[in-house]
Image (cartoon, grey):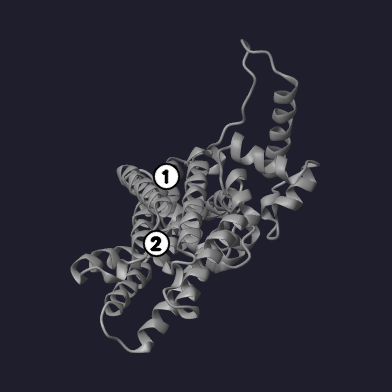
Amino acid sequence: MTTLEAALRGGAVVILLLRAAVAARSAGRDAVSRYTAPLAASIAGAIVESAPGFGTLDLGLRLPVAIVSAGVPAAFWMTMGAIFNDAFRARWYHGLGWLTLVALALMDQFRHPMAVDVARTGLSAAFLLLGAWHALSGRAVDLVEGRRRLRVGYAAFIVLYALVAIASDWLWPGGLSAPSISLANAATLTAVIFLFSMLSSTVSAETPLAQGAVRATPLPRPSDSQPETPSAGVEAAQLVALRHLLDHDKVFREPDLSIASLSQKLGIPAYRLRHLINRQLGHRNFNAFVNGYRLADAEAALSDPAQASVPILTIALDAGFGSIGPFNRAFKAQTGVTPSEYRRARLAGAAAAAGPGAAET
């Protein structure tokens, strides 16, 4: 290994470990950091493991590095979910996938059948593709412009490199650790680290996820002390028009409502609408923004004694949901109870409140 390659690999490892340490400190309050910390540490391990001569080290030195680096595909899968899906939560199958990769990596350090290599390669490729799916699937409804622009390029570059790295182990002896391409691999790894850091920084700097229901978001109004600028006036007017469409015209009840169709109703470009909802109202996902209105509409209907006999499916469809399944999941995620439980509690409360008044009358 040349001095230049050692410097590139060493520098990348140091940067990754520092990034993992910083992310670990923020893991308690930041969901993205919770996953970028293990990913950064895993990539650092992979950089060490892919260095020329690593296979000649004692088994006691190789095993810890192999364990750490084995989880890169699973960590990538989870990190892409956390970065590109604000509602992402790690599930049991993510942990099972990670443990399976570690087990296969440990077997790889000893004599093993070819099936172990095939299983490890196939599982790694599957996790990488799932990570790319996270990056690409929500682009149409992403309101965070910086993150939206990076989705395609980031997923394509990372997954392409990782798949090439996996395939190289089957195509020529030594894989990416072969002397003829080891330096080029080290330089590419440095570029990957830079891209990873750029995306994480971009996402961290964007508007934080809005808290609370959509209906609680106030419209900005110019203050008396600060004169309204032309651009602020245009934006305020667009927000008023947006509110009118949602609160008065109830356009959220249209099941197929999209950024494109709503921007056409407002008469503004789609990117301007994304900017309004993200920067002015603090929302990061269009579907979550619209569903906030739909859920508020459904809650009002379920609380109305006059609609006590209306089926919940009808209420869900009238509010704009396409089917009962997504409605039930979204409703319970927001309220903590099912629509039936919510209606029962609200109607019981309304009846109890009306009891004394009715008796006095």
- Can you see residue 317? yes
Tag 1 near tag 2, CB within 8 Å? no
Question: Residue 282, how many percent across, how many down?
Answer: 55, 38
The disc placed on residue 4 is none
Q: Which of the 4 quarters of the picture holds residue 98?
A: bottom left
Nearer to us in this view, 324 or 183: 183
- Can you see residue 293? no
Q: Which of the 4 quarters of the picture holds residue 67?
A: bottom left
The disc placed on residue 75 is 2
Q: Is residue 153 above or below residue 60?
A: above
Question: Residue 254, how many percent across, how many down?
Answer: 70, 57
Nearer to us in this view, 8 or 23: 8
Q: Residue furthest front?
A: 2
Q: Is residue 69 left or right of residue 314?
A: left
Q: Residue furthest left?
A: 60
Q: Is residue 229 above or below residue 240?
A: above
Q: Secondary structure at mark 2?
A: helix
Q: Amino acid at mark 1?
A: Ala
Residue found at x 69% / y 48%: 250
Residue found at x 71% / y 30%: 235
Please tell me how crowded label 2 is: few (under 14), some (14-19), or many (20+) other residues with Cα within 10 Å: many
Q: Which residue is mark 1?
A: 353
Q: How far separated are the C-alphas under marks 1 and 2?
A: 53 Å
Considering only order in the chain, which callout, 2 or 1, is on the residue closer to the N terminus? 2
